[in-house]
Amino acid sequence: MGNRLEGKTAIVTGGGSIGPGIGNGKAAAALFAREGARVMVVDLNLEAAEETRRLIEGEGGSCFTSRADVSVAADCERIAGECVRELGRIDILHNNVGIEIPGGILEITEDDWDRTLDVNLKSIFLMCRAVVPRMVEQGGGSIVNISSINGIRTLPALSGAYGASKLGMVALTREIAVEFAAKGIRCNAVLPGMMRTPFVEASLTDAWGGDVADMMRQRDAMVPIGRQGESWDTAHAALFLASDDAAYVTGTTLVVDGGLTCGVRTAPQGG
Ligand SMILES: NC(=O)c1ccc[n+]([C@@H]2O[C@H](COP(=O)([O-])OP(=O)(O)OC[C@H]3O[C@@H](n4cnc5c(N)ncnc54)[C@H](O)[C@@H]3O)[C@@H](O)[C@H]2O)c1
């Protein structure tokens, strides 16, 4: 247990996990609580959010949950109101929700395109529109948006809608950062690379040929560090940006990818 977020409150969207294990949002919620934050976990799947609450409370942390769809404006307004009612203020908004429906532009349907953009990108606009006025009133806050390196490079499983939504998040992050810098609000994005999380298994297995173990081996082998990242790697980057350690950091993108955006892994050199 630390104290980097002592006295702060945080909303974590998508703070459950899509499958067994610990995803990026669940890890961030748990880590924020370990560092002293009182956390509101929001998820479309209330049982997934409740699992995170049990994890946090089991470690002595403070958490409450709410079911919501962050692509729906009324839900986002309600979340912000509930957080202020329960916790008094909103210091950190951690926008973690994201879905991926793989496919190149000749494969993906128009509905899938719309859904991806709504859930991944419009949700950031809606959540920020609901939360930022509260942050302005209270004199500041920190927003962390979970984007992806897929916004700045292609990956083996083609994902046109996902990549477009994730780069859109980066542009929106910068806009919000500049617009509200003078109000004490910082806004940054984390760009995770290939992470070994339930999200990958749920979203990408078919696109990689259906064999999970083989997909994981191939993904590990591509990364210069020699393995995929963990959800905790994403969470630690988010913690830095959410905390006062990053007091002078806004409008930036923090890539957490084991070197993958620099290039794919080369064979070890003999000698
Ligand atoms: N795992 C990776 O390899 C990887 C890589 C780069 C970026 N990311 C990003 O990380 C984020 C997700 O990470 P995760 O591991 O927590 O994923 P996850 O799929 O486990 O998602 C967490 C939760 O989001 C909820 N959710 C989905 N749609 C929602 C909606 N409309 N409203 C509210 N909740 C909703 C799900 O019910 C789930 O419990 C995404 O933004 C994803 O794009 C993941």
Image: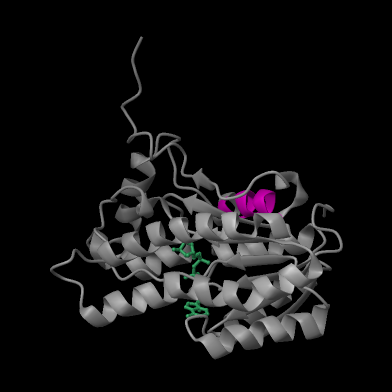
Residue at (77% x, 72% y) in the render? 137
Q: Is residue 72 above or below residue 194?
A: below
Q: Is residue 103 above or below residue 4?
A: below
Q: Nearer the viewer, residue 172 or 147?
A: 172
State how many labels appear: 0
Q: Say which quadrant the C terminus sits in.
A: top left
* Residue 22 visible to an observer of this rendering: no
Q: Position of residue 205 (x, y in %)?
A: 31, 65
Residue at (38% x, 34% y) in the render? 262
* Residue 117 visible to an observer of this rendering: yes
- Seen from this angle, which residue lies furthest left? 106
Give the color scheme: rainbow, by chain, secondary structure or one colour: one colour
Q: Main secondary structure of the magenta part?
A: helix
Q: Position of residue 57 (x, y in %)?
A: 79, 73
Q: Which quadrant would residue 171 be assigned to in this image?
A: bottom left
Q: Say which quadrant the N terminus sits in.
A: bottom right
- Left-right relation of 242 to 188: right
Residue at (64% x, 60% y) in the render? 180
Q: Nearer the viewer, residue 185 or 112?
A: 185
Magenta span includes 235:
yes
Q: Nearer the viewer, residue 112 or 169?
A: 169
Q: Position of residue 32 (x, y in %)?
A: 73, 61
- Seen from this angle, which residue lies furthest top? 271
Q: Which residues are magenta?
A: 234-242
